[in-house]
Image (cartoon, grey):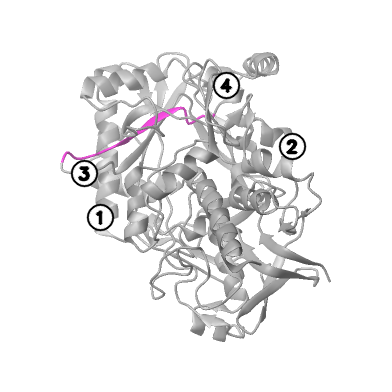
Amino acid sequence: MQQVDYIIVGAGSAGCILAERLSADPQTTVLLLEAGGTDASPWVSLPIGYGKLNADPRRTWRYMTEPDEGLAGRSITWPRGRLLGGSGSINAMVYCRGLPGDFDDWEASGAMGWSWRGVRPVYDRLETKVAPNGRRSGSGPIHVQDVKDQIHKVNRHFFAAARELGLPLTDDFNGEAPEGCGIYEINTRNGRRCSSAQAFLRPARARSNLIVRTNAQARRILFVGTTAAGVELETGEQLLARREVILSAGAIGSPQLLQVSGIGPGALLQDLGIPLVHANSNVGANLQDHLAANFTFKAREKTLNAVLRPFTGQALAALQYALTRKGPLALSVNQCGGFLRSRPDLTRPDQQLYFNPISYRLVPSGNGTRIKVDPFDGFIICAQPARPTSRGRIEIQSADCAVPPKIMPNSLATEEDRRTVIDGGRLCRKLMSSRALSGLVEQAVAPDLLSLDDDGILADFRARASTVYHPVSTCRMGENRGTSVVDSRLKVHGVEGLRIVDASAFPNITSGNTNAPTMMLALKGADLILEDRRQTGT
């Protein structure tokens, strides 16, 4: 029976960082378990390749939500990464720390030490900022690339519209003044995806005290009384941890694994015949996600469609990438956008905008969807409500961890969320009515945003909105045991030797893309684990 100091379940954005940090001590043994395979694929390293990955069952968990009343009773596909790097190996690579107020909210909700003042130095350690001319600042493993020299020229109309309307502009969403319209930075290095698997785990795998096992799915956590002692795999193999078991399986996987192991809502576990280790109704609760619905327009000038749709354009882009590691294949389609206030009475941004110089459709592919570029020159605009107040939940429906849990998003359940959707639609409509953007439009692709009133905006959002792939908070952090699952040091309430270090521990969703704060949480979480070890002297 294999025994190590730390077992980490899940080699995603968080788990890879933990594995590298904990194994830096050659006297410490670390076992990293990943249910999927490796990230050794050109589609993973190629930035634009993520468009093919979401529909690949070899690299994603193909979750489906329960019918969601707030989204017209639809079931939505929720792909999550199932490979080294997790969802950080299949995402669109937009790197946003989040707004400073997001983290002050974390501390106000009971996550002590996780204010902006507490997390900003962790971000600084995580990152190396790379300017268009190649100049670097910082020395962190994750490269954050400024791509303003590479974005498509159609984006100039978006910035002209912002200036026309008097909207704020920003040079850096991760800088001192993140509010406004700007260009998204992405986590790439030399034109390749810079995930935590590449930046942290890959160099650490040469260490003899780090064991990485792929295609190793955890079945349950092993307990001796109320102390986590190890993990049992689907094969029946049991692995033991001398110090701690750490769950980094994500906002769906971590609460599922807790519940099948006896930590969760008591009545649910009793109904399924699972022996109760610790009752906590917050396990799987407080689910939050970002939603958006794209508005598509045909353009009067060439967009990225003209490059990425025809074979000749693809071939030229491939040649450019091969020679320079630049061009459209080295970028995300999410090139521009912003954090904006939809109303003047607001004290901080309530919307995240995307302006993409390309248009596409999601078409069926296997049991999921894939991106297909439209057969015309088009572009997309959309608004994403930044901090939804609706709360959903994750519940297992079987004691067998191989059975997917029930995902119940409970979207648009609050009046505030419904109003924010309408306000976001109004903001996009205002931008599209500007001289700068209306002059770019040849024709709106139904539904026509400019023809929608408030009721129409909300009804259309219910009918078309989908996840932006940011589920969080299902094992939320806080000192109040009545409202949380882990404490401020990420230790699971009610048991010993068990932590959760991933996006499920977010007290609340951040205003923007969640991969950067997940990596920050992991780096800070590793600090806490190492501090606790030093204090105990073991």
Sequence-wise, which precedes: disc 2 or disc 3? 2
**Residue bearing the label numbered 1:** 416
Residue ranking furthest to the left: 345
| Whole-number angstrom distance, CA of label 4 to CA of label 2 | 19 Å
Sequence-wise, which precedes: disc 1 or disc 3? 3
Q: Residues within 10 Å of mark 3 (few under 14, many from 20)?
A: few
Amino acid type of disc 1? Glu
**Secondary structure beneath disc 4?**
helix
**Secondary structure beneath disc 2?**
loop
Q: Residue at x 50, y 35 (%)?
A: 94
Looking at the rendering, the stretch of residues picked out in magenta corresponds to 332-344
Amino acid type of disc 3? Thr
Q: Does the magenta segment cover residue 338?
A: yes
**Residue bearing the label numbered 2:** 41
Sequence-wise, which precedes: disc 3 or disc 4? 4
The quarter of the image holding the N terminus is bottom right
Q: Which label lies toward us, 1 or 3? A: 3
**Residue bearing the label numbered 3:** 347
Amino acid type of disc 2? Ser
Q: Is residue 26 left or right of residue 538?
A: right
- Give residue 332's mark: none
Q: Residues within 10 Å of mark 1 (few under 14, many from 20)?
A: few
**Residue bearing the label numbered 4:** 328
Sequence-wise, which precedes: disc 4 or disc 2? 2
Which is nearer the eye, 371 or 501?
Answer: 501
Q: Is residue 424 left or right of residue 358?
A: left
Q: Residue at x 62, y 76 (%)?
A: 261
Q: Is residue 399 visible?
A: no
Quick check: 535 above or below 210?
Answer: below
Q: Are marks 1 and 3 in contact (CB under 8 Å)?
A: no
Residue ranking furthest to the right: 1
x and y, in percent, of residue 388 in the image: 34, 53
